[in-house]
Image (spheres, helix red, strand yellow):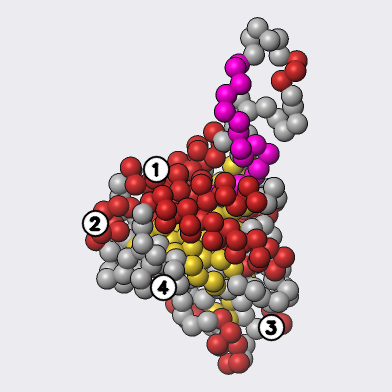
């Protein structure tokens, strides 16, 4: 779902983009059919210093994910720093296993949204992702049988949120249902930033060639002056930890059509370029591939995906706390 259309740098020499109405309409259409990687247009250098959130992000975000910036505290979990000393011993719950992720904030971004396809005017708005102007969001991929990527990503995110909260983490989500619109990729990054997340992930499944199989984890590439510049190193380490855990726990192969040994680096994804916290994307499999589709549509497999991602976060945060 996120095929490149040339590296961002490759078109910069061509001069400023001339985005007439036709061009914008084409980009919006491309955004509808594809994923976050489709429909990009190189931004002139003069525009790269403009607001990184881009016009329209807020409007779209407000339609489907109001309040998504609010951190959800685990029910029953003590506030940070609170000791159980004021609880009478006779009624105190017995000490169970430690919560290794207590105090950690993790931002989960389930890619796309269920009603994106029916709101082209909103998700087709162009937003500034530093290296390009891109559609606010896209409708995502699907299997040949019609199982949509947005449903996959939301289900995995819900499973993963449950696991992380059980380990004591505070989980922040970029959307709380699967029948809304957006938010824009710019807003998805901003939600993790506002939460000062210790780590973040955008969850996706690819819409690659049907012959291709496997997964890949995408880390942000270095862009001078971009908001994510200070977290390029940690994001790369997060990518490696997620890649290792995913490969080990799900048994899925590295993608055989994109990336290198399950890893890739890109500078065209707004969700990464605009992140000020360590963040990666994952393409959990390739939806048009028959074998991958069979697994992606299995609830049991999605639970394993969530377990794997939790393990990846835990490995990363163990070393960065
Ligand atoms: Zn996607």
Q: Secondary structure at mark 2?
A: loop
Pointer 1 residue Cβ closer than 8 Å to ligand 1: no
Spatial CA span between label 3 and label 1 = 44 Å
Task: Mark yes or no: residue 77 visible.
Answer: yes
Q: Quadrant of residue 51?
A: bottom right
Pointer 4 residue Cβ closer than 8 Å to ligand 1: no
Spatial CA span between label 2 and label 4 = 23 Å
- The nearer-to-camera label among 2 and 4 is 4
Identify the residue under disc 1: 303
Q: Is residue 12 left or right of residue 48?
A: left
Counting residues from the start of the chain, the first of labels 3 and 2 encountered is: 3
Q: Residue at x 50, y 37 (%)?
A: 162
Identify the residue under disc 2: 145
Q: Secondary structure at mark 4?
A: loop
Counting residues from the start of the chain, the first of labels 2 and 4 encountered is: 2
Identify the residue under disc 3: 45
Query: Is 221 rendered above or below residue 153?
Result: below
- The nearer-to-camera label among 3 and 4 is 4
Question: Bounds of the magenta span?
Answer: 93-114
Tag 3 and tag 4, C-beta contact below 8 Å: no
Q: Residues within 10 Å of mark 4 (few under 14, many from 20)?
A: some
Q: Residues within 10 Å of mark 3 (few under 14, many from 20)?
A: few
Q: Position of residue 181 (x, y in %)?
A: 48, 53
Spatial CA span between label 2 and label 1 = 21 Å
Main SS class of the magenta portion in the image:
loop
Query: Is 161 rendered above or below residue 250?
Result: above
Disc marking residue 258: 4
Magenta stretch encompasses residue 105: yes
């Amino acid at each position: 779902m996120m095929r490149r259309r040339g590296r961002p740098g490759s078109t910069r020499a061509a001069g400023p983009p001339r985005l007439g109405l036709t061009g914008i309409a084409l980009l919006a259409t491309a955004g509808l059919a594809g994923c976050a990687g489709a429909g990009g247009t190189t931004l002139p250098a003069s525009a790269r210093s403009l607001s990184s959130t881009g016009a329209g992000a807020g409007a779209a975000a407000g339609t489907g994910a109001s309040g998504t910036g609010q951190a959800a505290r685990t029910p029953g979990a003590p506030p940070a720093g609170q000791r159980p000393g004021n609880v009478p011993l006779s009624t105190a719950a017995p000490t169970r296993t430690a919560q290794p992720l207590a105090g950690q904030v993790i931002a989960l971004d389930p890619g796309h949204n269920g009603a994106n396809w029916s709101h082209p005017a909103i998700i087709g708005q162009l937003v500034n992702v530093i290296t390009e102007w891109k559609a606010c969001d896209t409708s995502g991929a699907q299997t040949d049988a019609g199982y949509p990527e947005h449903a996959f990503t939301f289900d995995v995110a819900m499973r993963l949120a449950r696991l992380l909260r059980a380990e004591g983490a505070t989980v922040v989500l970029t959307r709380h249902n699967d029948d809304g619109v957006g938010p824009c990729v710019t807003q998805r990054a901003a939600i993790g930033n506002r939460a000062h997340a210790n780590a973040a992930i955008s969850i996706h499944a690819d819409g690659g060639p049907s012959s291709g199989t496997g997964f890949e984890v995408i880390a942000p590439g270095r862009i001078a002056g971009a908001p994510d510049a200070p977290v390029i190193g940690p994001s790369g380490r997060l990518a490696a930890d997620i890649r290792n855990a995913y490969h080990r726990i799900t048994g899925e192969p590295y993608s055989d059509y994109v990336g290198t040994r399950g890893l890739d680096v890109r500078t065209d994804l707004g969700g990464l370029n605009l992140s000020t916290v360590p963040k990666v994307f994952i393409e959990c499999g390739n939806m048009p591939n028959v074998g991958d589709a069979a697994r992606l549509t299995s609830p049991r497999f999605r639970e394993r995906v969530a377990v794997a991602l939790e393990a990846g976060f835990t490995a990363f945060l163990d070393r960065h706390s």
